Image: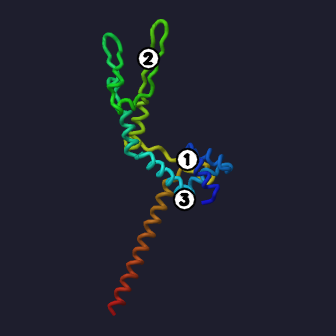
Amino acid sequence: MTPKQDLFVREYLVDLSAPQAAKRAGYGGRSSAKLMRTPVVLAKIRQAQAERAANLAVSAERVLAEYARIAFANMADFADFGPDGLTLKDMAALTPEQTAVIAEVTETKTSRGGVVRFKLHDKLAALNALARHIGLAAPEKLALTDSTGADLPPPDPSEIARQIAFALRQGIEDRAGSDKEQNKKKRSDRD
């Protein structure tokens, strides 16, 4: 790995933006796409991310559990609704798991009274993220690009079928040739 690639990796880990990291590391143009396909760069990024995860005790399961906590939070755990209006529950009575889903609590007091704003983290965003991670959501379309990062046209299904047929034919021919060689060797070993 070159020192410049190493700098790119360190810059990428700051904000996970390949174009910005390439720019900060002194690369020009569309270098970020090429860098993100360079095996040594990708390996270094994965290694650094694994080290970060280990240092923070972060695992995929822990992240998914947090998404689930937010996705399935219930406002009734935090407030009582009744004929007299809304009453927030005592924060001291909430579990750490419940307080983790609270995004905001603010109180504004005026001469005429006050307003309390109580907001949970985005439930729909958490449900969508959770669905993607466990395979409930349709996969996002992948964009095909060339080495410069320019979009490529979608592949032609008939061309894909032709290439698959060719690969299968080659595999069958290779296998047949290999079987013939093995049979020849067996016959010569017997003689």
Q: Secondary structure at mark 3?
A: helix
Dot 1 amino acid type: Leu
Residue appearing at x 42%, y 22% in the figure? 118
- Return the x and y of residue 82 as percentages of the image width and height: 31, 14
Q: Which residue is mark 3?
A: 39
Residue appearing at x 45%, y 63% in the figure? 165
Residue 156 in the image: above or below residue 97? below
Q: Which of pointers 2 and 3 indicates the residue nearer the eye?
A: 2
Residue 25 in the image: above or below residue 172? above
Q: Which badge, 2 or 3, is on the more N-terminal residue? A: 3
Q: Secondary structure at mark 2?
A: strand
Q: Are marks 3 and 1 in contact (CB under 8 Å)?
A: no
The quadrant in which residue 78 appears is top left
Residue appearing at x 32%, y 90% in the figure? 190
Residue 12 in the image: above or below residue 74? below
Dot 3 amino acid type: Pro
Q: Which residue is mark 2?
A: 116
Residue furthest toward the bottom?
191
Q: CA distance from mark 2 to mark 1?
A: 38 Å
- Return the x and y of residue 85 as percentages of the image width and height: 35, 12
Q: Secondary structure at mark 1?
A: helix
Q: Which residue is mark 1?
A: 13
Q: How is the image coloured?
A: rainbow
- Return the x and y of residue 20 as percentages of the image width and height: 62, 44
Classify mark 3: residues with Cα within 10 Å, few (<14), some (14-19) or many (20+).
Answer: few
